[in-house]
Image: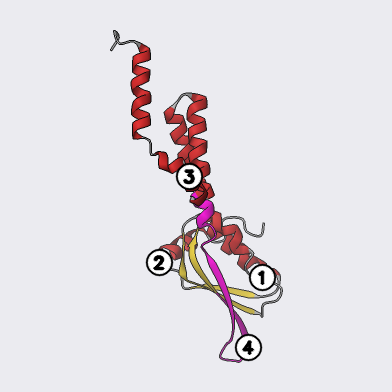
């Protein structure tokens, strides 16, 4: 390899790159149809590789950017639906059904989905259709129940799957909600 001129090696690398690159993926008509986040990840990765001359750094930055784009996208998949019911005594009960994956990116949205001042004295938060993935969601649930307590109301969390209930049981009240 030491006797091959550097210019020849560069030319071979350029030809390999040109031959293996999917040029269809960078056509303007294709880029317009792609999700903006994916396009930004691709452009960011290329820019970092060109500026640093280091493919590894470019790939690492691209993976981190893709993780952020993914987290932002799935953060809004969790939904909260409110219905009002009555208990056996005829008293109104606000019932919130939480559906989706709950983790650090969706936790902030979760706390804004409840009507703390307008709900009746009893509130049920039904977690049957959801899964708690991390401590930030437990902290958000603590904050929700604390806000209801501040309004003189009682919120009960029900329907958690086993792993979510285990995490909630381990961390609830320990993460500083209301402090």
Residue closest to the eye, 135 or 17: 17
Q: Please give the name of the residue rendered at 70% of the width and 76% of the height, measured from the top-left corner.
A: 118
Q: Is mark 1 on a helix, strand or loop?
A: helix
Q: Earlier in the sequence, mark 2 or mark 4?
A: 4
Q: Where is residue 81 in the image (x, y as percent from the top left)?
A: 56, 74
Q: In which quarter of the image is residue 93?
A: bottom right
| Label pair 2/4, CB-CB below 8 angstroms | no
Q: Is mark 3 on a helix, strand or loop?
A: helix
> Mark on residue 149?
1
Residue closest to the eye, 110 or 11: 11
Residue at numbered disc 2:
162
Q: Nearer the viewer, mark 4 or mark 3?
A: 3
Q: Which of marks 4 and 1 is nearer the N terminus?
A: 4
Q: Please give the name of the residue rendered at 34% of the width and 15% of the height, measured from the top-left corner.
A: 8
Tell me the distance, in whole angstroms, between the alpha carbons under discs 3 and 2: 31 Å
Q: Nearer the viewer, mark 3 or mark 2?
A: 3
| Label pair 4/3, CB-CB below 8 angstroms | no
Residue closest to the eye, 173 or 53: 53
Q: Which of marks 1 and 3 is nearer the N terminus?
A: 3
Q: Please give the name of the residue rendered at 28% of the width and 12% of the height, measured from the top-left corner.
A: 1
Q: Position of residue 65 (x, y in %)?
A: 51, 42
Residue at numbered disc 3:
66
Q: In the image, is residue 94 above or below residue 172?
A: below
Tell me the distance, in whole angstroms, between the alpha carbons under discs 1 and 3: 39 Å
Residue 91 belongs to the span the image colors magenta? yes
**What range of the chain is rendered magenta?**
70-96
Q: Where is residue 91 in the image (x, y as percent from the top left)?
A: 63, 88
Colour approach in the figure: secondary structure
């Amino acid at each position: 390899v030491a006797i091959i001129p550097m210019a020849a090696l560069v030319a071979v690398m350029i030809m390999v790159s040109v031959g293996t690159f999917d040029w269809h993926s960078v056509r303007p008509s294709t880029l317009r149809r792609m999700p903006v986040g994916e396009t930004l990840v691709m452009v960011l990765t290329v820019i970092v590789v060109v500026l640093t001359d280091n493919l590894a750094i470019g790939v690492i930055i691209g993976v981190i950017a893709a993780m952020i784009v993914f987290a932002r996208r799935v953060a809004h998949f969790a939904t909260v639906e409110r219905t009002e019911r009555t208990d056996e005594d005829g008293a109104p009960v606000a019932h919130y059904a939480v559906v989706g994956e709950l983790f650090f990116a969706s936790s902030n949205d979760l706390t804004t989905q409840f009507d703390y001042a307008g709900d009746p004295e009893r509130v049920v938060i039904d977690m049957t259709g959801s899964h708690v993935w991390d401590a930030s969601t437990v902290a958000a649930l603590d904050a929700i129940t604390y806000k209801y307590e501040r309004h003189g109301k009682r919120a009960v969390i029900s329907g958690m799957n086993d792993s979510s209930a285990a995490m909630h049981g381990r961390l609830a009240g320990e993460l500083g909600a209301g402090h």
